[in-house]
Image (cartoon, rainbow, N blue to C red):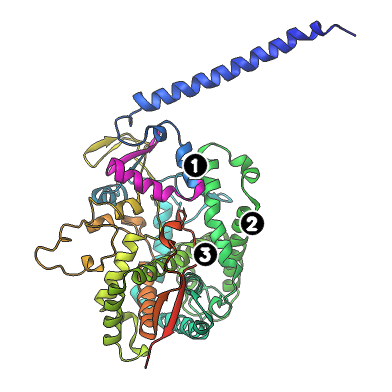
Amino acid sequence: MAPIQAYLPSVTSRNFLLGLVLLLIVRLVVINVIYNLFFHPLSSYPGPKLWATSRLPWNYFNFRGRLGWRIRDLHKQYGPVIRIAPNELSYTTSSAWRKIYGQRSPEFEKAVDGRGIAPVEINGKRALMTETSDGHARLRKAINPAFSERALRDQEKYLQAHSTTLLTQLFKSCNEGPVDMAKWYNLLSYDVITGKFIIPSSQLAFGTTANCLNQADQPHLQVLGNRAKSVVFFQFALQYGLMSVLQFLTPKYAREARRKHLALSAAKVQARLQAKNPGKDFMYYILENQEEKFSSLDLTLLASTFIVAGSNTTADTMTGLTYLLLRNPDKMECLKKEIRSMFRSKEEITIQSTVHCRYLTACLEESMRMRPALCCSLARTVPDNGEVIDGEFVPGGTGVGVHMLAAAHSELNFRRPMEFIPERWLELPPGSEFANDDKGGSQPFSHGLRSCAGKALAWAEMRITMAKLLWHFDFELANPEEDWWNKQRTYLIWERLPLKVDLKPRAA
């Protein structure tokens, strides 16, 4: 046997090489940190120094579900524009809304680097929310007729039917103890949007009725929640070039949620395509488009997008409004007074009549300001030649966006921003303390060419639903001591926490 000394040179050589590699890595990291802090084109912007050195702090809070809250707090500390990563700026001004999302030529393109919605592509296809400018324009042209005022009027009877079903279920449930209004709002919105997208003539949209309101134990709501959480893993993988090993990084529940959601969307599309006499549902307008033909995958991605965007957002807004009204009983009384004095019966509550409920509209506006359905930044990229944003030149390729939650909670935009004050959205008397509120800082439906296509549908659903509920019921928080507001986590959208409410049918 050879003496042990014979092995030492090779061991020493390996140790030396390993040490050299580690030294080079450390040196590169140090150089990168120094560059990002002192020599990067964004080095003069305010913000936490640690966030300027690496995207790891951003991802740390993202994985914890606290990124939305943390960036809001950083804006309160550092001001209306801050650096939140080596190559990303976050804004809170209405002028930034107009510049970043309103400018058409050149357009600030959607982020494809993991800062926003991820994954960007599925089987080589982009969805509506991640499409390029040209692709998005093509899709919007095809779907806009389905969201026209005429289409909405034609389909009001389905909105009314769903809201009536909700009332029926709540009358049954309210005597059994506290009711989880967050769940019921989600069931309603899911029925509405899956109806609106593709359903035979008896429904709004999907080929077969979802019927969630009549089957309240719906596992797909959990699938949607897990799908939202899975986005953080795709974002991290895109940022660090780890998409090839993503399946090993992502928990099973997240992988299964994405798979099940796409499978459900595909099944809905196929059911609608095979339906006889489906009527003028959402799919009708797309299939009637003679200029553009869509593949099954195109339709599946549209279905997926609208199930997520259409069901979560309106449900979140109504959940938030319910909580805020219950925390502000004087506002609740004002709203009930308006609704109960305006309508003599529930049949009078329509899309058209609720437009005239000024205080209801103001309450919804204020709820969407305080708790925007998207509690993040809609990530964009500065065009190649750079752009001037809020008076400062920003180099091309820089990541930018207006952070919805931070902008809506900014004292620079709103007086007493953390108070629920619907009156700020009404016609203000001379000298009102809210006269200088910059209402353009709150854009819950986004701004510009990529703003929400379903805005009119969302308003109709929320107005009708809230008006009917407050016409029929009195509400009380079941657990008033619970800090429901600050417990919420964010994953682009809000994590759905139960909102337990005691419902009492209104006295005759």
How many marks overall?
Answer: 3
Helix, strand or loop under label 2: helix
The quadrant where residue 418 appears: bottom left
Helix, strand or loop under label 3: helix
The kind of residue on which mark 3 rests is Ala
Which quadrant is the C terminus positioned in? bottom left
**Which comes before the other along the chain, label 3 or label 1?**
1
What number is the disc on residue 60? 1
Q: Distance of mark 1 from mark 2, alpha carbons?
A: 23 Å
Q: Distance of mark 3 from mark 1, alpha carbons?
A: 31 Å
State whether residue 358 is above or below residue 10. below
Name the residue located 39 percent from the left edge and 56 percent from the top edge: 137
Q: Are marks 2 and 3 in contact (CB under 8 Å)?
A: no
Name the residue located 39 percent from the left edge and 35 percent from the top edge: 87
Name the residue located 47 percent from the left edge and 45 percent from the top edge: 61
Q: Residues within 10 Å of mark 1 (few under 14, many from 20)?
A: few
Residue beneath label 2, please?
256
State whether residue 199 is above or below residue 344. above
Task: Give whichever of 264, 493 is nearer the camera.
Answer: 493
Q: Residue 395 in the image: state x and y as whole percent.
A: 32, 34
Task: Give whichever of 488, 194 is nearer the camera.
Answer: 488
What number is the disc on residue 100? none
- Which contiguous range is marked in magenta? 63-88
**Which comes before the other along the chain, label 2 or label 3?**
2
Q: Residue 485 in the image: state x and y as whole percent.
A: 41, 60
Tell which tag, 1 or 2, sits nearer the viewer: 1
